[in-house]
Amino acid sequence: MAQPPILEARDLKAYYITEAFGVRRTVKAVDGVSLSIQPGEIYGIAGESGCGKSTLLKMLLGEFEPPLTPVEGTVAYDFGEGPSDALGMDEAEVASIRWSRVSYVPQGSMHVLNPVRRIGDTFHDFISTHRPMPRRQTNEMVKAYLAEFGLREGVLQSFPHQLSGGMRQRVTIALATILSPKLIFADEPTTALDVVVQRSVIQLLKRIQRDHGSTLVLITHDMGVQANLADRIAVLYAGKLVEEADTRTIFKAPRHPYTQHLIGSLPTLEDKVARQSLPGRPPALDDPPTGCRFHPRCPYAMDICKSVEPPLVTLEDGHRAACHLITDEADHAAHSRPALA
Amino acid sequence: MTLLKEYIVPRLIQWAIVIFIGVSLTFLIPRMSPINPIDQAMGRLTAFQTLSPEATLALRQSLMDLYGLEGNLLTQYLNFWGRVLRGDLGPSFSAFPTTVADMIGSGIWWTIGLLGLSTIIAWTLGLVLGGLAGYFPDRWWSKAVENTLVSIYPIPYYIVAFILLMLFTYYLPIFPLVGGSRGTASFSWSYIGSLVYYGFLPALSLVIGATAFRFIMSKALASTERSSDYVRFAEIAALPKRRIVFRYVIRNTMLPQVTDLALSLAAIFEGALITEVVFGYPGLGYLLLNAINASDYNMIMGITLLSIVGIATASLLVDLCYPLIDPRVRYR
């Protein structure tokens, strides 16, 4: 760990705070998440719907508005010029950092392109905002870039509805990465695409990350996509980080019961019987369970799980997990190696 | 070209059918009446004023012709169409022997000028203000504009007209009471200036209400656009707010608004009856009121035919403009 992390969140708490008819409702969507992402790595954030993935992404991107409120903790970027706060940026700072350094590939991409604007015009809007240049020059730049993506020049003159879903997603990825950003957030980039297109999108993201040396933060519930792309994976459950390790470890030796179920739900070619699904549903985040938030669904739940929240402990090789089953084990490890977070 | 074949030609055919049905109904309606409109009209006319024998005969003849009381139903119908196509609507009863076509011809430009301009101004203002207020709902100015326009909206336009008339011609005599212009028609600054001067209050009374209506619609549409994926994406990319509002939000709210503009423009041909009467403005509305008061059937028929053609044509023009605004209509 020679380089400082490009993105670091410390004990981040972000709640949706609403007040209607005098009743205050707090949804703890992200509740004490700490993570640090190294330059050049592909960092996956996984978890089922409603676990706080999207909220965490909004906070990491510094793009939030009420009722979503940062309650505690920090998010900082570091592009080699010292850390800068990501949560308190004003409009000018946001404009200076977005797209040229921090970019975002949205989910779905069916409706992220303005239906009444030609693709070329949209590209010009996005590029000239951050790097003022005449229209002709952006056209040249986009043409060259789209060619790398296997998209014809004619795409520039098209309207979004004339493109197929896969082309639209490639155009969107191109739109997000044309200024070679250092840090790219991809929010469910393969959802709503068929598997063939998914594959090409995965390869495309991988290539961009390699060619530009960017850092990619990949948010998806699809563990298959995570396995294909990510170097390291963080698993979120009910607004908390429950496990984080390199991809191989997450898939081969997951420690948290939730991660074990997540991995166990993946079908394999040798399957002869139906996969086991995890009973129950993710908890409502306005009133999460006490203690370990996973205990109502956990097959190994003990008494301590109902009252005491398990700490996120570091095992060997930066493998972190939060479960009472392994807390003791980590205590022993802590004697030989100092814990990280 | 597929655009011509699949888009323009069907709409032209539709336009022709609408006009055909409208004109045919106008032909049939007097025929459904149990009373003889000619005797009625002649009786009413000769009761209050004396016409010269030639005028009476010409009038009866023109009524016979126009109402098609010569020959059988089919020949009458064909003759009627012949007249309509030639633009021959007969003489006006109340201003005999001036023809209806001449009178409509002189009134229509006042109405088109007044209503066309005020409709377009109100449409543009409402669209832009509504778009801005929908995109920036929390700014003080957007709340101020919204509260003002929403309180004005329920006031009928003729009440606004009376209030403006009293305020600015009686208490503060800035604007003229009646009329459409001063001096003889010419392309001079003084004449055009007088057009604006005389048209200002009537136009304002129409613009206020129409802007409020457009604003409310436009704001609702813009609020929806604001949370659309492409606007969110443009915001995350930190595009300038001005560009987002105009190119991303308002540009998309325009699509349904253009259809509505067509309907408002089509209403021009009925004239803003009350506004023109309140301000003594020499347009179609004024003409129609006088025609109704004087039972000037030829004139009423003329204005009816004109509004049928006008509404159909305005809808056609907007349909034809639609591909320019929505690319999804352009290609299929």
Image (cartoon, helix red, strand yellow):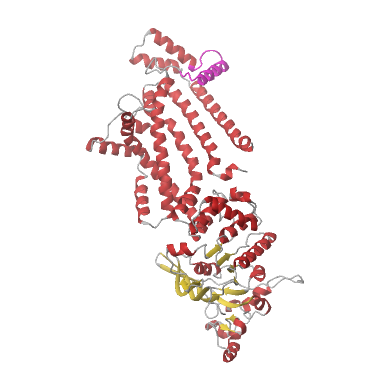
Side (left or right) of B178 relative to A41: left
Assess whether residue B56 is covered by the magenta stretch: no
Q: Position of residue A269 (x, y in %)?
A: 76, 70
User: Residue B232 or A277: which is nearer the viewer?
Assistant: B232
Let me know if residue A114 appears in the view: no
Q: Position of residue A201 (x, y in %)?
A: 65, 62
Residue under the point 48% across and 37% down? B262
Q: Position of residue A94 (x, y in %)?
A: 46, 64
Q: Position of residue A117 (x, y in %)?
A: 54, 49
Side (left or right) of A250 relative to B199: right
Q: Quadrant of the C terminus of chain B?
A: top right
User: Residue B42 or A117: which is nearer the viewer?
Assistant: A117
User: Residue B171 or A116: which is nearer the viewer?
Assistant: A116
Read off the magenta span.
B66-89
Side (left or right) of A27 relative to B4: left
- Which image quadrant is residue B173 in? top left
Assess whether residue B85 is covered by the magenta stretch: yes
Let me know if residue A331 appears in the view: yes
**Residue reaching furthest to the left:** B171
User: Residue B40 or B304: which is nearer the viewer?
Assistant: B304
Q: How many marks?
A: 0
- Which image quadrant is residue B327 in? top right
